[in-house]
Amino acid sequence: MTRSVGPTSEPQADDATKAKDVAPAAALGVGTSDIRTLLTRNLRTSGIYIAFVVVVALFAIITGGTSLSPGNITNIILQYSYILILAIGMVIVIIAGHIDLSVGSVVAVTGAVSAVLVIRHDQPWWVGVLAALAVGLLIGAWHGFWVAFVGIPAFIVTLAGMLLFRGLTLQVLDNVSLSPFTPEYGKIASGFSNGLLGGNGFDAFTLLIFAVAVVAYGYSQFRTRLARIRYNQPVPSFPLFVAQVVVVAAVVMAFAYQLATARGLPYVLVILAVLIMVYGVVTKRTVFGRQVYAIGGNLAAATLSGVKVKAVNFWIFVNMGFLAAVAGVVFSSRSNGAQPGAGNSFELDAIAAAFIGGAAVTGGVGTVVGAMVGGLLVGVMSNGMQLLGIDQSIQSMVKGLVLLLAVAFDVYNKRRAGGR
Amino acid sequence: MSDHILEMRSITKTFPGVKALSDVTLSVERGEVHAICGENGAGKSTLMKVLSGVYPAGEYDGEIVFDGQVVSFGGIRDSEHAGVVIIHQELALVPYLSIAENIFLGSEKRGRLGLIDWNLANAEAGKLLRSVGLDENPVTPVGQLGVGKQQLVEIAKALSKDVKLLILDEPTAALNDTDSAHLLGLIRGLKDQGITSIIISHKLNEIDAIADHTTIIRDGQTVETLDMADPDVTVDRIIRGMVGRALDSYYPERESHPGEEVLRVEGWTVKHPSQDRLVVDHASFDVRAGEVVGIAGLMGAGRTELAMSIFGRSYGTFVEGKIFLHGRETKARSVAEAIDAGIAYATEDRKKYGLNLIDDIARNNSAAALDKLSTRGFVDANEETKVAEEGRRSMNIKAPTVKSIVGKLSGGNQQKVVLSKWLLTDPDVLILDEPTRGIDVGAKYEIYTIINKLVAAGKAVVVISSELPELLGICDRVYTLSAGRITGQVPVAEATQERLMTLMTQEKELVG
């Protein structure tokens, strides 16, 4: 059976639109891109990096270089590590369109559980750590259950959790602080790898570790590039690629040298680096990560694409609980004890880090690296202002304004791009 | 000459790129019930929005004479002040407020100090409720009432505003037979009180029963106004007016060689998720490999609901029914299971339900088929880009790269991304819900070509469409759906628009 129904009008629109679209396709097709397209392609994501560089440079100039001194850099890392760890989990929660207000309390309760075991019951350090992580996972599952399976908004569930687990902390600690931890436990957050290979005023081992990391980075970038070429995808021109790798390597090695001349390689930096790498891959390259973005971007479309929304939401919160427990361990180790008020308002710092780092209030947008830079931006600013002796009250106001401006920038960009 | 309460003269309304109304004329006599009929998208709702000031004066051309005066409404407030009240298909009541609060929302009964006098408001509301025959306490929250009673609250609200002309847009679409009969009786009662009504409806039996005149609109133009008292004017006569459109679009040719049966649905019955009524009522149909089967139905017939409930029960509450794929029963209870079973459903609302607009083409393309593009939970980004690139080429998606953000593409190109996305799941049967809605002629042709390629490759395709010429142009068979029931099956060689429309408007006999 052949069918053709009264051809009275030809589809003339077809050719016109075709011709119009040929030009840009050819210009942007397979090939290499220069540095300008690389920077301007996504102002929204590169904006945060530019802001970070500006802030670092600004404080380096105002403080006469003190802010970039070896001791101070080490300090910033130790001081903000637990916020950054929380921000990794938080940005995933936010990408999926949720929020978690409970992480400060979870930091407190996991640290408290660990302190009770290690300090009161003389357990080895790793028993405390494992118990804290187990408690974190359970709390995450608790939140995940209510959000994913009962359908209560995360704002409410975690607000309740914030109160609940703060109270539980007081219960566990009998309303008193516990300290000090054993020296081994203390090393988690304040330990350094130093003097392993000797050195003259600097730690050679630190430099070696970083050198290995830089080489590994260069190699993986090169392999990614080759794979993209094999798939006929645009890559930066070769000189630009080399320049990119060299710049990153130089910045990282300068940073490593500063660490090496101070106290060496902090263990907590290793923990943080591993977490960033793992979660960078999880969000960018796994099916789970993809589904998180899909849920946040358009819940209905994700559901109709076969995403198991409930399961994904559940695991997002379990993961947040786990990372809050890691932060709890690091924080209790750093403060060398557990206090009833530990972790107060950490949730707000972590949320701020995610939003400053480019996550969208409406969900669907955000990156782990962005959240890290957002967190560091706040860290560098606070630290710089401390060095300058600026009052705590002003610091808080500046932080508030930065958060507001960052989100305003995001909203403005979205509107300019024509919205959703 | 008779007394006209409303005359709309030469109304023309254009949206960017589309002429929604072109030189429409409508005359309504004082104290009559005037029906407006037309296919989906004919321009009925647009015309009513012009009348009620939703599109303020200046945004359209033409003249509106109401109650003997030329009027130019700047908004709904103006039109309501003049006595024109519109009740939309989606009821505009606040569910958590009481009946009285809803009735007087925006025109609260104030007492001393400008505070609201609730005793007065509740008493007045009680009177209004009695006049519409609704026996409810005015302090009852509206959300506790059924849709039929909510409809009556809307009418009570209209009466509180000294209504002269009441416009009801599809008032019985969501009502069961008893509620519909009551509502129609009420409209007759209002007529006796001298209130003029305009009723927009797809249910031609209802129109035949209560309207004095019927104006037919087609493709944004007035076709004719029929006097319902004339014995020659029957439901068939109205249908002829509604569909009298020429087949002016072009459809690509296709050799049709239907093969084995792929999908068979038997006795499929689904309840509304929150209301106690059947949205799909014992629907049965089948599709064979290499065949395009159409589902024709008017707004509210349950087309999308039928499709979505088949697609992993993603709509409503399952009551009963069976789905067979290649002769074997499948019990897919989730979308993921439906996809695995080989069913794909491309939604009618691609922006709301089909695409993640803030993400790029490649990632949208792979959203339903990540299993195929990943190993041990890791997505192969290069492979993903490659298949997206293939999709872009074969579908002719006009975008610079597959990294382009989907929200910035034209409707036609977005629709191609949706199709490409579902083809990636390698389905046996594709259900395409309004695949050409809101896209231009050229892109429509391309979508038809893609559909032809799919059936040539042995896929089974179900097309749901409001446009009868489209169904006649691309399908092998067409099922008609009315009030959730399949009312007929017509091979396309024997199908005409009139015949389909007759089946689409076939309904159970009116009660009362």
Image (spheres, coloured by chain):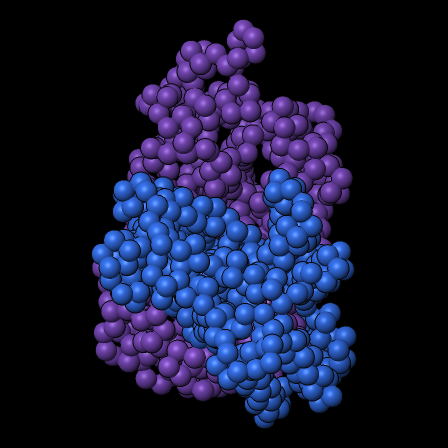
Chain colours: A blue, B purple
* Residue at 43% in and 18% down: B125
Quarter of the image for residue B285 reads bottom left
Q: Nearer the viewer, residue A346 or B392?
A: A346
Q: Position of residue A6 (x, y in %)?
A: 60, 74
Q: Position of residue B460 (x, y in %)?
A: 40, 78
Q: Is residue B280 left or right of residue B494?
A: left
Total marks shown come to 0
* Residue at 47% in and 75% down: A193
Kindly tell me whether residue A112 is visible in this rendering. yes
Quarter of the image for residue A396 reads top right
Q: Residue furthest front?
A: A200
Q: Position of residue B30 (x, y in %)?
A: 58, 26
* Residue at 23% in and 74% down: B329
Is A336 placed above or below B492 here?
above
* Residue at 44% in and 63% down: A189
Is B172 placed above or below A354 here?
above
Q: Position of residue A297 (x, y in %)?
A: 51, 61
Kindly tell me whether residue A54 is visible in this rendering. no
